[in-house]
Image (spheres, rainbow, N blue to C red):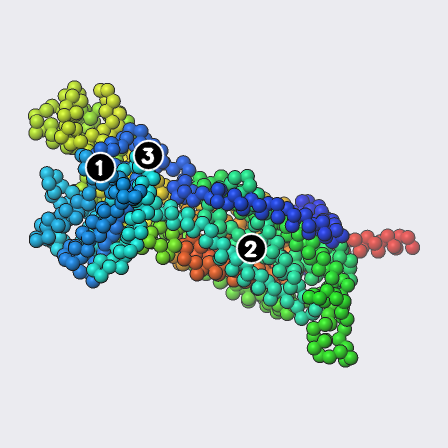
Amino acid sequence: MGRTCRRTDCVAKPLSGLFERLGSLVGSCPLYFLVIPLILSAALGGGFTFLKDRTDNDFERQFTPRKGPSKATRAFVREHFPYNDSMFSKDRLYDKGSFASLIAVSTSSSNILANPAVEDIVRLNNRVLNITVLNGSMGFSELCARARGECVSNVLLEVIVSSEADQSSITFPVQAHGSGSVFLGSVLGGVIAEANGSVRSAQAVKLLYHLDDKENTADASKAWLRAFKRLASEETDGKHIDVSYYTSKSRQEEIDSHTTDGVPLFLITYSCAITFSVISCLRLDNVRNKVWVAVFGVLSTGLAVLSSFGLLLYIGVPFAITVANSPFLILGIGLNNMFVMVSDWQHTNVKDPVPERMAHSYKDAVMSITITALTDVFKFSVGVVSDFPSVQSFSLYASVSIVFCYIYTITLFGAFLALNGRREASNRHWLTCKKIPSDHSDHYSAVYNICCVGGDYDKNTGAEKKQPASNFFKDYYGPFLMKPYVKGVVIFLYVVYLAASIYGCFHVEQGIELYDLAADNSHVIRFNRKDRQYFSDYGPSVMVIVNEEFPYWDKTKRRQLQGCIEEFKKLQFVDEDVSTSWLDSYLSYGRETHLNLDDKDVFLRNLSRFFDSFPFLQQDVNLTGDAVRASRFFVQTVDIADASTEIHMFTGLKTTAGRCRAASLSVYNQEFIFYDQYDVVVSSTIKNVFVITAGMLVVSLLLIPDPLCALWLTCSIGSVTAGVTGFMALWDVTLDSISMIVFTLCIGFTVDFSAHVSHAFASSERTSPDDKAVDALSSLGYPILQGTLSTILGVSVLATSEFHTFRTFFKIFFLVMFIGMVHGLIFIPVFLSQFTCGSDKSKDEGKDESLDESLQISKL
């Protein structure tokens, strides 16, 4: 006899009794539990009429932290450094503004600075400049952003054309032009240069067309951008240049145009799930066949999604593109619930009345389903308070969907199971519903005996005959797994699995490519990949902002501040030779004009004259009265080739700003709004894991009548989470706001299978741990296998999607289902049998028998 320990079923026992009475009620009055959910679904489904109004895919609002630090910095920049419409400067934008862009790449890998490629670029540029909208009344010259009264042009083209005779006169990355110089690092790509900076050849050219953001020309600007896209799409496959294009509206338009693209995948997934469920529930017995039960199980899950989404759309909850992933999750939960319910139904006595069979089924099955439902809802409730609105929307839709899925499982699906039970009780055919004989007879033809006879059952147990797969788990797999040497092998394999998982965890890459929400064949993807390939040598120009009033005329403090700026230039991802500093320029101006700029009055009195000569720099100083309230400098980043280097750059810049003791500094670029997620994703994921694990422990202790089983179940969260995280890295899945959503939703899902097995183990009436494990596998091994295979088959269609979001969901969900199944069918049974207590029921029963014998003897 195994070790014994105290059972903690003070909550589970009364709940089981409650579910038992509910099962009896559903079995007695199934029509009420069938019709009411159907009516409710029809009513709530009307909420989908508001889908278009509720859709919110604003990229910044949904996929960046609500309280991101860069948003606060942007607000500071907007307040202290307002735009000067007459002096447009791309680097000084705090928002992306309105623009269009082209990347032209030489098709033959030859020099794009030579003819005929240059001729094609000039011709394309002229076509763009000649675009007109609103019946020809507005063109680029009317809509362009201006500096010194003229349209901001592509200076690179002027440089190329003027240097056509002598290409070596072009220097990189800074080129002398007019009375000043221009930075070519962001517009000339694939450059091969001499040691002195003279350009030998280049492979790519980027052209930018910035528009004015005035309200009175907003409609015309949008029309011009649409016309630009039409023109550029006609030029993508040139003879000498390969053209990619992009506009300030492209990313958002791409997301908006694909919000409902998951619907076809959703329909295919449900079709696959229905097909697999029907096949797995097929029986050769024409009475015990569960085809319609399987179909209705999948349909009830679909109705749960319909009802929950409709309800939230009615009350105005935003529908983000990430929400489109949740129906696939709910499908997995619904199928899992269905298979567990059917399995428990098949263990009841076929001769008992339907209400009694339903009571027995609900007593164990619904208790197990309740555990998983509570943990699932709890984990998504954590996401509702996320700093990412897209995570909030997803979590809210998923939570409500799980609640409806649970309710519909124990009412709608249960009612249909009871009606199907009535059909079986009267020995009616699964297709025609006509009564048929239960025994084969020689008087009938072979075809008749196959197609029109049924109702057999196990005469020893009174239950339905077990499927071969169920017998496999009971007679072969379970006993084999409990052999001592097999347990040793399993524990060894678990150690190997855990080591590989931990290794992978240390190699998870963080970061998101901002174009990953676009379709693979989108012009957004094409442009951004070209941009990464040819223009990653120079990254964004970054503002270094002095956030407070500072005495720039104080020589000592000024030198300290300049020392802080020099620290930025020493960073490996910053070009120390390319920067913009109004202060250094002013000091040079002071030396040339013999001004004592260490004197406050002289410093402030001569600023206006200095800005007359350098009007662009005036936008970098907030001068209020006799004080400089704020100012900014610019440094140029380099070698920003991918998302991981963006994180390194972003973190390094913020750390350097924080180390400055001379003044309060902050750093900003319009793209930093999206980089803020890097600070939140990891911390949020870790917090979610701990919170969900703690919640899972509480729920398990309350509802699983064995504390050690509850503890092992909770530990399985950490185990599966480590596995999913580690193998994510091996499958090239990076940790970003998208994968965080999927990962968070999967954390709780990881224990669903283990929860079913743990509850069955703890509830088993067997005495030894090994027998309890075999009993649990006999009851739930096949349903777990069914649920895993049907769900993986269903979501496998996402692997073929052209969207990164859906493919990421498939990868993580596949890992969760597969690793969760391995834990539920292999690791958890072994650990429960090896490291938990045996049942004390036998002792109690022995005491009761001894007491009865004593009473009988005393009576004699």
Q: What's the residue at 47%, 54% (across, down)?
A: 262
Kind of residue sitting beneath label 3? Glu
Number of other residues with Cα within 10 Å of mark 2, as a class: few under 14, some 14 to 19, many 20 or more: many
Counting residues from the start of the chain, the first of labels 3 and 1 encountered is: 1
Residue 337 position, x and y percent, is 61, 55
Q: Residues within 10 Å of mark 1 (few under 14, many from 20)?
A: many
Observer-side mark, 1 or 2, equals 1
Position above or below: 617 against 329: above
At x 56% / y 44%, what residue is drawn? Answer: 47
Please, what secondary structure does the residue beneath circle 2 have?
A: helix
CA distance separating discs 3 and 2? 47 Å
Percent x, y of residue 738:
42, 49
Residue nearer the viewer, 75 or 157: 157
Query: What secondary structure is marked by label 1?
Result: strand
Of callouts 1 and 2, the N-terminal one: 1
Residue 790 seen in render: yes
The residues tagged by marks 1 and 2 sit, at their Cα atoms, a distance apart of 55 Å
Label 3: few (<14), some (14–19) or many (≥20) C-alpha neighbours in 10 Å: few
Out of 231 and 553, give the one closest to the viewer: 231
Q: Amino acid at mark 1?
A: Arg
The quarter of the picture where residue 602 lies is: top left
Disc 3 target residue: 215
Residue with the mark numbered 1 = 146
Q: In the rendered view, does 421 fall on the left or right side of 701? A: right
Disc ID at residue 331: 2
Looking at this view, name the residue that lies furthest to the right.
860
Residue located at (71% from left, 66% from top): 432
**Which quadrant is home to the N terminus?**
bottom right
